[in-house]
Image (cartoon, rainbow, N blue to C red):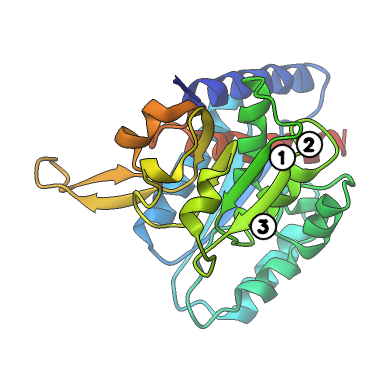
Amino acid sequence: MELLDGKAISKQLREELKEEVEQMVAEGHRPPHLAVILVGSNPASETYVNAKVKACKDVGYESSLLHFPPEISQEILLNTIDELNENEDLDGFIVQLPLPSHIDDRTVIERVLPGKDVDGFHPINVGRMALGLDAFVSATPGGIVELIKRYEIETEGKHCVVLGRSNIVGGPMSILMRRNTYPGNCTVTIAHSRTKNIKEVCASADILIAAIGKPEFVTADMVKEGAVVIDVGINRMDDATRERGYRLVGDVAFAEVSPKCSYITPVPGGVGPMTIAYLLNNTMIAARKRK
């Protein structure tokens, strides 16, 4: 069993981006600029946003954080997005989800210009990705593909089971893994909460990507000997032995599953760091287009 070390690979990718920023600035161009809109005070969202801002600083990007109270109106938020769309000193921006219940996520996502949608959530980017055209790929699926590529994991002809069908991870992941490219050329099955015989379906996978949002859902009897397992989940479980009162676990029961795997991602330190690194990568792609 070999760990797919997202921490190490994300560091590698960020070093490459940092070198490109230095070259860009040396040639007289401004560095890439990423903005983040955060609404409210969700602790998890604040943690993610702070990590993104720090990552920008580490690679030499400019970053802007626009933090609004939870009661902001949808109209004001949409007007802010319009301003960012028109800002030529900004290469890309994201709206951190989830948003308060009085704001419609879909309306907000569709207001972002596809060319600045470095989260890859706009329907135009999703559609272009599905067609194999130039598009921003959402950061978590994109980061997973990058991880597979850098570990040179064979994907052609393999059976890939994606556990979870969200628009953010499961759906895009299934499209990326069946593309006629590398990584890709898999036979893809999407499994979810309504799938019958879900254990048998997962156990048939050469590559299992778990993004179902249930702590330690995938057990040893759901995994084929020698499978590649990629755990997208990050869940808090109460743990009185820890100072903070909880521990982080994935959607995979790591201790019992890992001995059966050829490769597996840890939680934390697997997919999470790759998500942030790939967001930086998308921002660089946007910046290259205005040079």
Q: Nearer the viewer, mark 2 or mark 3?
A: 3
Q: Quadrant of the N terminus?
A: top left
Residue bearing the label numbered 2 = 285
**What's under tag 3, amino acid-wise?**
Gly
Mark 2 lies on a secondary structure that is helix
Who is closer to the viewer here, 31 or 252?
252
Label 1: few (<14), some or many (≥20) within 10 Å? many
Q: Is residue 137 above or below residue 97?
A: above
**Residue 171 marker:** 3
Who is closer to the viewer here, 161 or 15?
161
| Mark 3 vs 1, N-terminal side | 3
Query: Residue 280 in the image: x percent, y percent?
Result: 64, 36
Label 3: few (<14), some or many (≥20) within 10 Å? some
Residue bearing the label numbered 1 = 282
Mark 1 lies on a secondary structure that is helix
Label 2 – label 1 distance at C-alpha: 5 Å
Query: Residue 17 in the image: x percent, y percent?
Result: 67, 24
Tell whether label 1 touches label 2 (CB within 8 Å).
Answer: yes
Instruction: Determine the residue positioned at 67% across, 35% down.
Output: 145
**What's under tag 2, amino acid-wise?**
Ile
Q: Is residue 211 above or below residue 253?
A: below
Tell whether label 1 touches label 3 (CB within 8 Å).
Answer: no
Label 2: few (<14), some or many (≥20) within 10 Å? some
Quadrant in which residue 248 is drawn = top left
Query: Residue 80 in the image: x percent, y percent?
Result: 66, 67
Q: Is residue 131 above or below residue 11?
A: below
